[in-house]
Image: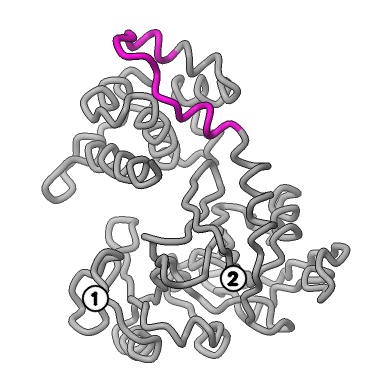
Amino acid sequence: MRHWLAVIMVRLKPHHQDGSWGRRYFDPRFWPFSESTMERELVMRHERVPEELKAYGQWVNWRMDTGRKIPVNPATLGNAGVQWPNTWASFEKAWEIATRHHLGIGFVLTQADPYTCVDLDHCVDEQREVSEVTRSILTLLSGYVELSPSGTGLHIWIKNEVPVNRRTIGIEVYSSKRWMSVTGRHNPHLQPVIPERTAELAELIRLHFPSEERESQNLPVGLEDEDIWQRLFRSQNGALFESLYRGDTSVCYNDHSRAVIMLANHLAQVTDLDAARIKRLLYQTGLVRAKWEERRGQTTWIDYQILDAIRYVAGRK
């Protein structure tokens, strides 16, 4: 067990008149103090969750299962889902269940609320420092920022008038059809208020998803597998696709699952959601692992990832 004594101190010029990112501290009192994954997942701060989020009846609990967060219905302790409003509850109910059963809490994003959450994964290192890219995003959005349950990521909450769901390496943006874990672990020197940042989010999309529309166009029908790979390799992000094809996961923070998900998403785009072809193409890469054919309920691990990619891409069309 190790105690974290470092404090992230990000000193930047104020981006907004309120100076909200002029100087930020992440107080170690609100960080997990154990190396235990479960303890890290369950640390929450009731009093620091934004009051405006508490006012919505869009809360769920969650538990860990084989490395994944599973949403839980606060009323029944059965499964919850973003598509089932009758499995959501008030904040107080979710909090009560969380404390009684040692579960996490999460907020369901819908088109009926004004919120967007930007999820930055694996951006806080062991020295509690963040990269220049992360700092630039924090400065641009200047939103309500929380540490993720693991303590290695950040969630940036903003209000946004143009709903958007986007995902790329290290950056995920969600406005609806998604639930996000909430920890309440944020800068204790700032009020937990969620600002309006529509224009800033549009700039984030422009900067970090510049080639998405071009690369998401379906390729001509009848192309051989080799032709698909070669076109991807020649695209603007060709070096990334070549690395994933070779099985190099360093481009995804050495996270094998993230690498597979990233590549599956792009293959879903260019194959017009053809599950069989996506699977065949994935098996041509150096990412193949024995766990791909392990059962996960009614399906295998790899088939689940493919179906998830198809659902994600289809939801954006």
Disc 1, SS? helix
Name the residue beneath numbered marker 1: 87
> Along the horizontal axis of the image, is 120 left or right of 261?
right
Q: Is residue 268 or residue 198 the one in the foreground?
A: 198
Q: Residue at x 38, y 75 (%)?
A: 104
Of the numbered discs 1 and 2, the one sitting upstream in the chain is 1
Q: Is residue 138 or residue 68 the one in the foreground?
A: 138
The magenta span reads 211-229
Q: CA distance from mark 1 to mark 2?
A: 25 Å
Do the residues bearing badges 1 and 2 touch, measured as CB atoms within 8 Å? no
Query: Residue 186 sits in which quadrant?
Result: bottom right
Q: Count residues near mark 1 (Cα–Cα under 10 Å), then give few for <14, some for 14-19, many for 20+.
A: many
The relative height of residue 64 versus residue 125 in the rendered view (above or below) is: below
Q: Residue at x 66, y 73 (%)?
A: 195
Q: What is the number of the mark on residue 146?
A: 2
The relative height of residue 122 versus residue 143 in the rendered view (above or below) is: above
Q: Is residue 305 or residue 175 the one in the foreground?
A: 175
The relative height of residue 228 versus residue 302 in the rendered view (above or below) is: above
Residue type at tag 2: Glu
Measured as percent of width and height from the top left, residue 245 is found at 44, 21
Q: Quadrant of the C terminus?
A: top left
Residue type at tag 1: Thr
Measured as percent of width and height from the top left, residue 81 is found at 26, 66
Measured as percent of width and height from the top left, residue 101 is found at 29, 84
